[in-house]
């Protein structure tokens, strides 16, 4: 397993642990993609499950979103959990909903890809806001 895969796996585990200790059930979004970083989250009393995209990094990094993003509905998740320093003793997680991501993304001037820079997501209003999910 590559370092990148271990970092991604650590991010998924961190998100699952944080949510499970708050009463959420965390499952892979697809039974066929057990290694996916897209998680289905549900809780008794909440009407329907939703999706959280985990993105994890060893340090601060830009988050790639892909191409052809035209609005919130073109994102394949409801929330994005961006964890930095994930393989350290003190990971930090920033939780952004779809609209937060759309408002902070920018397009590559030389191509079709979109991303969110660390300066746009590293903010105390997004840090560890598990109660907003």
Image (cartoon, rainbow, N blue to C red):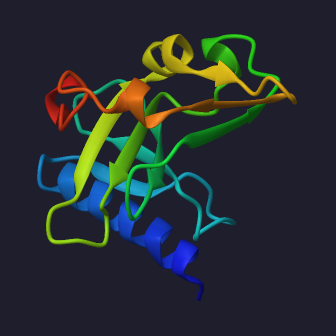
Residue in front for this viewpoint, 107 or 73: 107
Q: Quadrant of residue 67?
A: top right
Q: Residue at x 62, y 32 (%)?
A: 115
Q: Residue 127, percent across and down? A: 21, 34
Q: Quadrant of residue 14?
A: bottom left
- Number of residue marks: 0
Q: Quadrant of the C terminus?
A: top left
Residue in front for this viewpoint, 131 or 103: 103
Q: Is residue 43 above or below residue 92?
A: above
Q: Residue at x 19, y 53 (%)?
A: 18
Residue in front for this viewpoint, 35 or 26: 35
Q: Residue 128, percent across and down? A: 18, 38
Q: Residue 23, percent across and down? A: 15, 47
Q: Quadrant of residue 114?
A: top right
Q: Residue at x 49, y 20 (%)?
A: 98
Q: Residue 85, percent across and down? A: 30, 61
Q: Would residue 96 appear left or right of 66 to someone viewing this image?
A: left
Q: Residue at x 37, y 58 (%)?
A: 59
Q: Would residue 107 appear left or right of 98 to someone viewing this image?
A: right
Residue in front for this viewpoint, 82 or 85: 85
Q: Quadrant of the N terminus?
A: bottom right
Residue that lies at the very extreme toward the bottom in this rendered image: 1
Q: Would residue 101 appear left or right of 92 to someone viewing this image?
A: right
């Amino acid at each position: 397993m590559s370092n990148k895969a271990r970092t991604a796996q650590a991010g998924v585990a961190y998100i699952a642990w944080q949510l499970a200790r708050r009463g959420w059930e965390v499952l892979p979004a697809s039974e066929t993609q057990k290694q996916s970083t897209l998680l289905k989250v549900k809780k008794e009393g909440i009407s329907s499950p939703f999706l959280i995209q985990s993105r994890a990094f060893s340090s601060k990094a830009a988050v790639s979103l892909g191409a052809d993003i035209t609005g919130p509905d073109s994102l394949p998740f409801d929330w994005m959990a961006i964890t930095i320093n994930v393989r350290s003793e003190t990971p930090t997680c920033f939780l952004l909903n779809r609209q937060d991501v759309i408002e902070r993304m920018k397009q590559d001037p030389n191509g079709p890809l979109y991303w969110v820079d660390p300066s746009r997501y590293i903010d105390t209003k997004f840090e560890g806001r598990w109660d907003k999910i």
